[in-house]
Amino acid sequence: MRLSQFHLNTSRETPADAEIVSHQLMLRTGMIRKLAAGIYTWSPLGLRVLRRVEAVVREEMDRAGAIEMLMPSVQPRELWEETGRWEKFGGQLLKIRDRKETEYCYGPTHEEVITDFARNELQSYKQLPVNFYQIQTKFRDEIRPRFGVMRAREFLMKDAYSFHLSPECLERGYQTMHAAYTRIFTRLGLKFRAVKADSGAIGGDASQEFHVLADSGEDAIAFSDASAYAANLEAAEALAPAAPRAAAAEAMREVATPTQKTCEDVAALMGIALARTVKSLALMTPDGFVLALVRGDHTVNEIKLAKAPGLGESRFATEAEIADYLGSEPGFLGPVDPKKPITVVADRTVAAMADFVVGANRAGFHLAGVNWGRDLPEPTHVADIRSVVEGDPSPDGQGTLSIARGIEVGHVFQLGQKYAEAMDCTVLAENGKAQTVWMGCYGIGVSRIVAAAIEQNHDAAGIVWPEPMAPWKVAVCIINPKKDESVAEAAEALYRQLTRAGLDAVLDDRGLRPGPMFADIELIGIPHRIVVSERGLAAGTFEYRARDASESETLDRAALLARLAVA
Amino acid sequence: MRLSQFHLNTSRETPADAEIVSHQLMLRTGMIRKLAAGIYTWSPLGLRVLRRVEAVVREEMDRAGAIEMLMPSVQPRELWEETGRWEKFGGQLLKIRDRKETEYCYGPTHEEVITDFARNELQSYKQLPVNFYQIQTKFRDEIRPRFGVMRAREFLMKDAYSFHLSPECLERGYQTMHAAYTRIFTRLGLKFRAVKADSGAIGGDASQEFHVLADSGEDAIAFSDASAYAANLEAAEALAPAAPRAAAAEAMREVATPTQKTCEDVAALMGIALARTVKSLALMTPDGFVLALVRGDHTVNEIKLAKAPGLGESRFATEAEIADYLGSEPGFLGPVDPKKPITVVADRTVAAMADFVVGANRAGFHLAGVNWGRDLPEPTHVADIRSVVEGDPSPDGQGTLSIARGIEVGHVFQLGQKYAEAMDCTVLAENGKAQTVWMGCYGIGVSRIVAAAIEQNHDAAGIVWPEPMAPWKVAVCIINPKKDESVAEAAEALYRQLTRAGLDAVLDDRGLRPGPMFADIELIGIPHRIVVSERGLAAGTFEYRARDASESETLDRAALLARLAVA
């Protein structure tokens, strides 16, 4: 491609309304242009990158035996009624009425359509297993679209759906997709983690998310320093401490904490470690008052809390309820001597503590030297209700956990029979009887990957594309093309040689001055830059610079070609 | 591809609700499945063909210098208000409200979006000319979707938009696209015609349609047997007869035609050629009563009629108006001796007639031997108001016209400044002043091409794909794969050899009996079929059959590879 024949429209200005760096850089490079809230046009430059991602995804899906097809974007309401999602999906479902007042939606996902397709197409167990996928535009009516294509309303997705005769076969298909996803993100040159996701009622390994690691990621991920273990913060188990509870060493005593209402303030006043204190969270449930306890330096994890015994439907207790059950006011709550019987749910760590500090249920006081079994009964329930922290042991028993931030770009999920049952998707089994199929679904946010890659790979000068995603692998820049024709000719010849060798090269023949030209090439993140100049030509050399290098190098033709791995 | 690993689901039944052969065959082959009215899923088989078309379109657009991008499918109402098309586009525009009650449409076309993109992206004449295109899903809310993907509501389209500084540059860009389209349809192996379309107010060569020729086509096309001339029936000019009007040879006389109200009946009664009679069409216009005349064997063309002098806003005259102006009743109208002054618009052919037959303006009578200038004044206006017929001279002066039927699959159009003016799309010209740009637009119905190709290429056994569109070029069929392993192995080896040679081959390893297997391969239209059997293997031969041949041939390996052009 000759850049003079392309449409490149970069900007030096950082757009005011773009909060994150990928959004800023996608606007500055001109990769995307906003048409409406959460709706973007992909410019020629942006589309080149999007297509690179799409191609890798397609190749690896094909290699994994998935079969590509294409479903419509407009889907009839009736199908969504069958699964109950017409109502349940919520506001993200963009509903449409056609000229005959028939109702449709712009598909945010395709479980209903593929299950309808499958129940008509699949008659016999002999047709299973099968995995259908598509790469297609979806729409989710986000209430607050933001961050450019990172959380857009109209976006490009790869979605795959597999059909199986048994849960064992589903598990194998799921692992095949897991392996394909691993190849996809590896080939794209991204640092990523496959993390165990909270999979609700299905449990086990039935759901994993693929996250591109980036400081700006919306999700926190816990991963082991010694194994492949990685999980969403909600899904990462906090193990019980390995050491048993120590014996009580102190007597329980009241400590005056006149204005100290937080564990931090109490620990500071007492000159003790925050890890010696215990936080109390007062909750009301249909079965009564519950006090949930986590160590002072830990954080309650709401998703884990909701799964703890009796806490499926809880809310924060009111001040009146707290006074009623504990005789206390907020800031001084504790599990010792409540006014009325209460349920105590202790985090595993708290259950293993001795000589700890809690609120005294009396304004202005805390209790220190508190011990289970002596000063208060053993907790009603012991459960994992906190988020893991850096340094926690890895749940798989190997190494300790680190916390990183990630951007979810893929999701593999064992749906089981949920959709197949709701929509009566059966095949005739070997025994001649109708059998409901088992399903998996596997999504990749194709357009989101582009933004996530930028979040992970950029510097002050712009994007630093991983080579497989770059719009072009190498840029050949001409200094003063009009001044000296031989320079332009030499650049042309080099460009043609690289192109013939199968390298995706771009010739910057726009005639810009070196400063703006180099700034553009760096901004749009081309991995390799070659400068052809009069001086270099005289010396038989080219100036070469890798995008991620700090210095240019002067190379002769042979060294240059070797550097670019051109035979 | 191994067919056992693919999803093929054919049917012997002709679906009752499919009226045209392409729709029937696309359902029987399983290429498409209906999801809702005018909304189809493309199965793996169908998508393979669709992608072949898409690839050729993309390659030729790129080769022609157009730059690919991707615009959203959901478009904001405001842009459509700027051009007035939010109301004017009519019921085909699928309007959408999001959760915030903001109005959008599902794009049926992208003039507004691209013009908005261009007015933001294009600042200088130096950026022109430029041609942006996309291949993307569109939606038109057809009131009566039918014929499968031929007239679907959701469909795949390639749309390109070019921007120019002058009408001359637009003309050059238009010709470039015309040439690209010619290459596209040629490469796809389709018989097609580029036809002059009625381009309304713009006129000239500013609009051409590309039609795939097929007997089932909705549009009639006139084309020369001696030149490249081709036009829509509305756009094909009917020339004035080359020979001058003959001198009057008969006297005008009344002929009793008691029940003969049509030219056909009158000619039959009188025993003369239909071409001796003249049909009168009574019209009312804001300027008064008009009688439009065409020869008895010709058909009035309404689009041409509307362009004739004074007939921009006409309607059929009522019986009362006919009685008022002509003193006649319908069936016996004529231009001779009207009761009140009337305007006569004669078709060019009629203006050159002598001794013709018209209604006598008296019930039960016609006039014969009528001559212009003698029996009635020369016509007020002479115009081309009839459709051309087979045998008419070609308007370019070369050869005579034939009439064929076609399916419109492409359209190139010089938009001029219509959208650029409405949306204020300007660039700074060389003189430093803002100048409104000139635009062209160029569409191809990608999904429709698939159906049109089938309409043109099929036989009783199924589809006969032009090679470039076939889902696979060659099928290797195994007879009794389980009975004799060496047959399966030999077929595998041949399949791998063909694949390695770059031939897109499919191995039919499903283990079907020969009858159903061959029927499938013929139905889905694979151009080359090779059968590997025990008997053939023993003789060192393969059974080869081209899809469009009536007989199989027995070939040895070398002859087979030569036939498939494999080195």
Image (spheres, coloured by chain):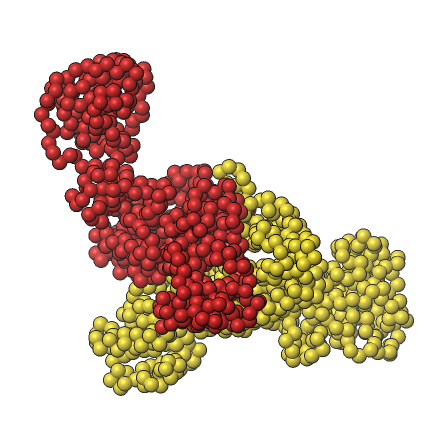
Chain colours: A red, B yellow
Q: Residue at x 25, y 23 (%)?
A: A268
What percent of the width, then of the height, locates residue B316?
Answer: 75, 56
Determine whether, in the image, residue A157 is placed left or right of residue B61.
left
Q: Is residue B244 above or below residue A111?
A: below
Q: Is residue A158 above or below residue B227?
A: above
Q: Residue at x 29, y 66 (%)?
A: B4
In front: B383, or B339? B383
> Which quadrant would residue A312 be assigned to in this image?
top left
What percent of the width, then of the height, locates residue B99?
Answer: 49, 38
What percent of the width, then of the height, locates residue A168?
Answer: 21, 52
Determine whether, in the image, residue A491 is placed left or right of residue B357.
left
In front: A406, or B13? A406
Residue that lies at the very extreme toward the left in this rendered image: A247
Determine whether, in the image, residue B354 is placed left or right of residue B66.
right
Confirm whether residue A56 shows in the render.
yes
In front: B383, or B291? B383
Rendered-image quadrant of the C terminus of chain B:
bottom left
Counting every numbered tag in the picture gives 0
> Which quadrant would residue B3 be assigned to in this image?
bottom left
Q: Is residue B22 above or below residue B112?
A: below
> Which quadrant would residue A304 be assigned to in this image?
top left
Q: Residue at x 48, y 57 (%)?
A: A518
Q: Residue at x 22, y 58 (%)?
A: A430
Confirm whether residue B29 shows in the render.
no
What percent of the width, then of the height, locates residue B62?
Answer: 51, 66
Rendered-image quadrant of the N terminus of chain B:
bottom left
Determine whether, in the image, residue A484 is placed left or right of residue B502.
right
In front: B183, or B462? B183
